[in-house]
Image (cartoon, rainbow, N blue to C red):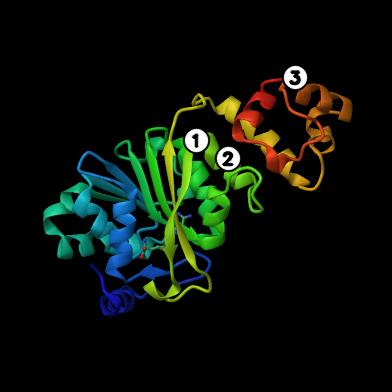
Amino acid sequence: MLGPNRIRELAAEVGVRPTKTLGQNFVHDANTVRRIVASSGIGPDDVVLEVGPGLGSLTLALLAEAGRVVAVEIDPVLAKRLPTTIAEQAPDQADAFDVITADALRIARDDLPVAPTALVANLPYNVAVPVLLHLLAEIPTLRTALVMVQAEVADRLAAGPGGRVYGVPSVKARYYGDVTRAGSVGRSVFWPEPNVESGLVKIVRTDAHPDDPDLRRKVFAVIDAAFAQRRKTMRSALATWAGSPVEAERRLRAAGIDPGVRGERLGVDDFVRLAGTD
Ligand code: SAM
């Protein structure tokens, strides 16, 4: 485990000055790292995809439990140093580790040396939701995801229909599986300390919807339209999406949805039925 002193030393050694743009807040607390790994439920049969390994504190804990870890890091300086850190701290597991220097938002399944089964990551906060949704869409072999994100984002992802913070990320995450809040994390476990609290979110893929990119695009388009004007009824919120208010009403009725309802009352299955009414 990389404690607070080692984290600072390593950063100084490689010449990294953590940037906000890349969400570089490094965890230096062994308990937090253990909690993340325990909540993820990973074991020796898992190939873990870690986004943003940074200086490697979570990576080391993942390597101790998983069969293999593939890390994707956008910062070339951090990515270059990582194999040395693993070789120094966990020489027996060095063969089970790969790092790719890339933007996780652009990663495709063919860019990875193996098919990962689980995503475990302390995500860069400014791109957390797009990264999570991109990877769930692009890599169907990912059965579970345990991610640390900004607490408000964790609340939004885990919210169910009718809740105050239920919205686009909540519904889209539910398209892939069951989503639960898996705990809270304070600021003091990071260096540098972020300005916000953090939260853990777990997604377990259920395969409730087919892995069909065309269907997903259609479903996500109607979700975006429904929440673009939150206060409006579905009849008017979906007028542009459907072509006219009359057509919106027809499609809503065809999907068995009351046209006077607001989007925040609908579950992902309602949006899937709506997308299929064309
Ligand atoms: N996992 C480390 C830890 O827990 O200490 C670092 C987590 S830090 C919150 C986020 C990491 O993601 C940083 O190392 C940053 O360089 C990296 N990162 C930022 N944007 C990225 C992107 N688009 N793709 C891949 N890595 C990214």
Q: Is residue 55 left or right of residue 152?
A: left
Q: Does dot 2 land on a helix, a strand or a loop?
A: helix
Q: Residue 24 location, x and y as percent?
A: 44, 67
Which residue is rendered at x = 78% and y = 22% of the image?
253
**Which quarter of the rendered picture does the C terminus lie within?**
top right
Q: Earlier in the sequence, mark 3 or mark 2?
A: 2
Q: Nearer the viewer, residue 195 or 208?
A: 208
> Would you name the residue on which mark 1 appears?
176
Which residue is rendered at x = 33% and y = 49% of the image?
40
> Would you name the residue on which mark 3 appears?
254
Check disc 1 and give the amino acid type. Answer: Tyr
Say few, some or many: other residues with alpha carbon within 10 Å of mark 3 (under 14 / 14 to 19 / 20 or more). Answer: some
Q: Is residue 272 left or right of residue 83?
A: right
**Which quarter of the rendered picture does the N terminus lie within?**
bottom left
Check disc 3 and give the amino acid type. Answer: Ala
Q: Nearer the viewer, residue 116 or 146?
A: 146
Say few, some or many: other residues with alpha carbon within 10 Å of mark 2 (under 14 / 14 to 19 / 20 or more). Answer: many
Q: Is residue 112 left or right of residue 3?
A: right
Say few, some or many: other residues with alpha carbon within 10 Å of mark 1 (under 14 / 14 to 19 / 20 or more). Answer: many
Q: Residue 113 location, x and y as percent?
A: 30, 39
Q: Does dot 1 land on a helix, a strand or a loop?
A: helix
In which of the image's four quarters is ligand 1 placed? bottom left
Which residue is rendered at x = 27% and y = 42% of the image?
47
Report the Cα–Cα distance between label 2 and label 1: 7 Å
Labelled pair 2, 1 in contact (Cβ < 8 Å): yes
